[in-house]
Image (tube, grey):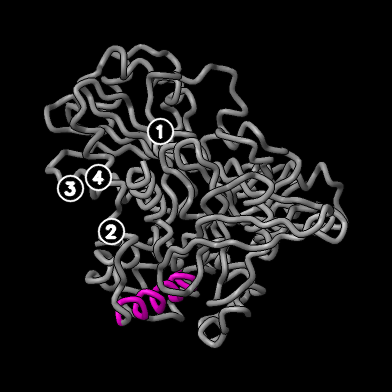
Amino acid sequence: MLRRTAENHLNTWYQKNRRKPLVLRGARQVGKSTLVREFAQNNGLVLNEINLEQHLYLDTIFKSLDMDIIIRELDALVGRNIKAPGAVLFLDEIQATPHAIQALRYFYENRPDLPVISAGSLLEFALADLHFSMPVGRIEYYHLGPMTFREFLTAVEPGLPPYLSEFQINQTIPLTAHQKLIKRQREYLFVGGMPEAVHAFVEENALTQVTAIHRSIAETYQDDFSKYAKQKNLALMQKVFRQIPRIIGQKVKYSNISKEDKSREVKAVIDLLVKARVCHQSFHSHCSGVPLMADINENVYKLLFMDVGMAAYITGLDWIALQALDGQALVNEGKLAEQFVGQHLLNPFEPPRLTYWLREVKSANAEVDYVTASGNQVLPIEVKAGKSGTLKSLQQFALNKNAGLCVRFDLNPPGIQEITHAVLTEAGSVPVSYTLLSLPLYLVEELPRILDEMRMGWG
């Protein structure tokens, strides 16, 4: 069984006195349905699961917004009282009957004692075609992505996760543990976090089986496109799907994705794939302050794929090649390290929001891979796939934005140091000083906690 951290959130949600219907959002095959089933089983709850793709006629029932009619219909469908104590109603693939989304409001207002979970892979597609308002304030969202590296570790080598969760910035990680974590992190670049792929790796340790699963998932996604794209856009959508892993870390230029199609058509397809959580945008922010998203340029962005293992598969990077790559080569092989960090910076309680910083001037371009915030402090994050690399862009950011703390992810053991460096500007050489927090890639999930602890320590 693959344990998901999100199950803790479901437990917290279930214990609330006045819980709202919970809507799980996320791409296909990231494990939403399995998560709900495991949650119910582990808590001894009766799960009344209804896959709405298999019962499309229910849309008319939900459209009535009459809770007595709706509940009687659902009772008859599952063959028992869905309001019985210890029962949970699970409406899976809720986008198939969109009026069920609207009806969630009335579950909350009229049947608050009934725990309701819904899941939808392509919710935004359904909402785009309808004109009713979402039940704002009466539902709760949780965004589920692929399994994280820590969840992967828990499955493959349970003794290692405590080195992550118990890490303190003033402590060292034993060299043996560090080397094991680096090895497992590299495996994760190939396997990724799609639960089926992780399960195959854990159960069979069969890397060829992992590749077969990635192929199957990719084919499933491309088959799905026919449901949501007009026929003339279908070929373009499949093309963009396979192109995104190849341009990770690059500012999007529509002509680089398809020279044969108009930019607005490519952009429209990207927008659809973003809605389906197949990819995520990281916007250039001017980084003048918090919140970073208030300072973005929506026309300047990079793309991340939904999962690093899927990205590695689509770019044709097999396990033998991945093992053979040195750190610097990885930077040029699909930007897998940047993808790895990016997908772990996403917050499950918010829609996917990522920012980076870009300065384009003649002879002195600078780009910081990600920018995040800790309190009101703006923090630049640089990702290095190996053990070495320059910090020119971080230093430019520290100078331009007066950043006192910068973060670097690489393959070195963790450390913190005070840096003073001369930065060349049009006015000449200018000194800049900042604190550099250097963390191994495998600690990316711990970054929010580490930053909070540093703020408290400095407070």
Q: Position of residue 450 (x, y in %)?
A: 37, 53
User: Label 1 amino acid?
Assistant: Tyr
Q: Which of marks 1 and 4 is nearer the N terminus?
A: 4
Q: Which of 247 and 331 is in front in this view?
A: 331
- Residue 92 — which label? none
Residues tagged 2 and 4 counted as in contact (Cβ below 8 A): no
Residue marked by disc 4: 8
In percent of the image, x 30 and y 60: which residue is there?
168
Mark 1: which secondary structure? strand
Q: Is there any visible trace of residue 242 in the rendered image? A: no
User: Label 3 amino acid?
Assistant: Gln
User: Label 2 amino acid?
Assistant: Ser
Q: Position of residue 173 (x, y in %)?
A: 31, 72
- Disc 4 crowd rating (10 Å Cα; few below 14, some 14-19, many 20+) is few
User: Label 4 amino acid?
Assistant: Asn
The residue segment tinted magenta is 176-191
Real-space CA distance between mark 2 and mark 4, rounded to the nearest whole angstrom? 15 Å
- Residue 165 — which label? 2
Mark 2: which secondary structure? helix
Residue marked by disc 1: 141
Please determine whether, in this image, residue 155 is positioned above or below residue 177: above
Looking at the image, residue 409 sits to the left or right of residue 302; the answer is left
* Circle 1 or circle 2, nearest the eye: 2
Real-space CA distance between mark 1 and mark 3, rounded to the nearest whole angstrom? 22 Å
- From the image, give the main secondary structure of the stretch colored magenta: helix
- Disc 3 crowd rating (10 Å Cα; few below 14, some 14-19, many 20+) is few
Residue marked by disc 3: 41
- Quadrant in the picture for the C terminus: top left
Real-space CA distance between mark 3 and mark 4, rounded to the nearest whole angstrom? 14 Å
